[in-house]
Image (cartoon, rainbow, N blue to C red):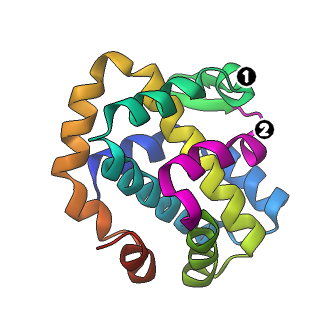
Amino acid sequence: MTPILLLQLRSIITSPLISIFCKKFEENEILLRKSIDTSICTVLIGLENIMDNSILYDRIVDSITFTEFYKTTEFENGKISSINYSFEQEGFIPLNLIFSDKKGRISEMISNEVGIKSETAGAILNFAVMLILSHFAKERQKTEIIQNELNSQKTTILNNVPEGIRVLLGY
């Protein structure tokens, strides 16, 4: 069963965007989609782990609104219609707050588990965190609902995260 949050986030990403990513990162479409799913699930679990620390969680979600990615990424009918590649740099800060010193190891594990280049895995992990935080910031009035959904779907989401990453995150 696919987690509802993953389906919602996946639906934001259009096929043309996947094609652009395939060309930019020179990766296979199927592997790229798998890396996006893995990255989204990994970030969701990382966020779920810090949600009890409401000050840190709020700081992370609030910080996204100041980024170029958040300000310039355009949506049409709930899907990304234009993207700013600033996520490649801007994703480091929230990822470091969520995963502290594990970010590099996580992206390397995604690379190894999915079969994509290390640079691509790092960029896709950055994209995933910026996408999720942008979504959470836009849905700020539904924070409690999102947190409850994430908590209730945690096991299903974890099933979409490779074992090595689960171990690294303490599962």
Image: magenta residue range: 82-102
Measured from the top left, where is residue 34 in percent x and y?
A: 53, 68
Q: In this orientation, which residue lies closer to the viewer: 141 or 4?
A: 141
Q: Which residue is mark 2?
A: 86
Q: Amino acid at mark 2?
A: Ser
Q: Residue at x 43, y 75 (%)?
A: 168
Whether label 2 touches label 1, CB < 8 Å = yes
Q: Is residue 28 left or right of residue 95?
A: right
Q: Amino acid at mark 1?
A: Thr
User: Which mark sits nearer the N-terminus, 2 or 1?
Assistant: 1
Measured from the top left, where is residue 30 in percent x and y?
A: 59, 70
Q: Which residue is mark 1?
A: 72
Q: Residue at x 69, y 45 (%)?
A: 17
Q: How many marks?
A: 2
- Secondary structure state at the residue bearing disc 1: helix
Quarter occupied by residue 162: bottom left
* Cα–Cα gap, marks 2 and 1: 9 Å
